[in-house]
Image: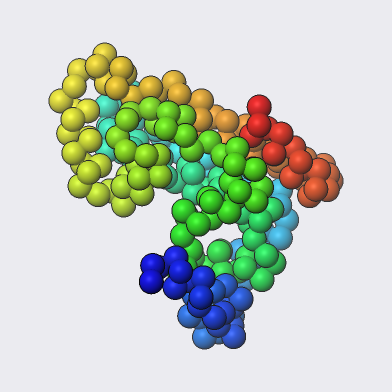
Amino acid sequence: MTAKKKLANAKPAPACPVKGCKAKTPHTADPVVKSLVDQFNRADKLLYWVLSSLTEIRNSIIDDVEHRRHFAWITRLRQVEELYYRALYLLFVAPGGAVPHVISCDPPNSFTQIYDEVNQKLLQNGGAFTSQSLHGAGFGTPMEWLHGSGHADYKTMRIVSFLQAAGSDRVRNIVQFEEVFRHIDAHIRRTGQMREMFATGRKKKDVRKKIIQLHQQ
């Protein structure tokens, strides 16, 4: 039986409705988790955190690219996707009882599963993970790239050594940095639009409709 099937057949623990969670007490018994859950009850506050973090990471990636710190920028790409898609999951997809679990980071908390649910249930398969749009480097699928870079695995190190051996002009032919930055900027722009809508009192259904439209453009 695969891990996915085992998780599907798992029974929720009494302390948490998420299948496969082994928590013996509610996640909100942890004061840090409780504080974050309380803060993120306001969507505009959650999105402010996400927007600020995405902007910092983008600026850091730009600086790393300019100074040929390839390992640094590659290992940040998953952080961009985690921040954005986990925010969409918390706001529009996750059942209410699952929010403390996601915020706690206790397993299971798979980014792949969260992305799949967001893409299917919210974005109507209009998510941005295509073979070119995420990285344009041609090293495996986008999700393989994200997993490897997020864990700083040896395949990532091999890619970095390859890029370091290439000259600056050749690197820009291998990695479409303009596409990378357009992808990150789109996440930042959409996050800012959602935050503004929530901050001005727009209803969740209106923001949901807007984010679907933005992903279909």
Q: Quadrant of residue 207?
A: top right
Q: Is residue 176 visible?
A: yes
* Quadrant including the N terminus: bottom left
Above or below, comparing residue 177 to residue 76 in the picture: above
Residue 141, position as x, y percentages in the image: 37, 39
For image coordinates 71% across by 34% down, the residue present is 213
Along the viewing direction, whichever of 124 and 18 lies nearer the viewer: 124
Q: Quadrant of the C terminus?
A: top right
The image shows residue 48, relative to residue 13, as above or below, that is above
Q: Is residue 4 or residue 14 the one in the foreground? A: 4
Q: Nearer the viewer, residue 194 or 154?
A: 154
Q: Residue 171: x, y in percent?
A: 27, 21
Q: Residue at x 81, y 43 (%)?
A: 206
Give the farthest residue toward the front. 1
Which residue is most to the top? 169
Which residue is depicted at the point 15% across and 25% down?
165
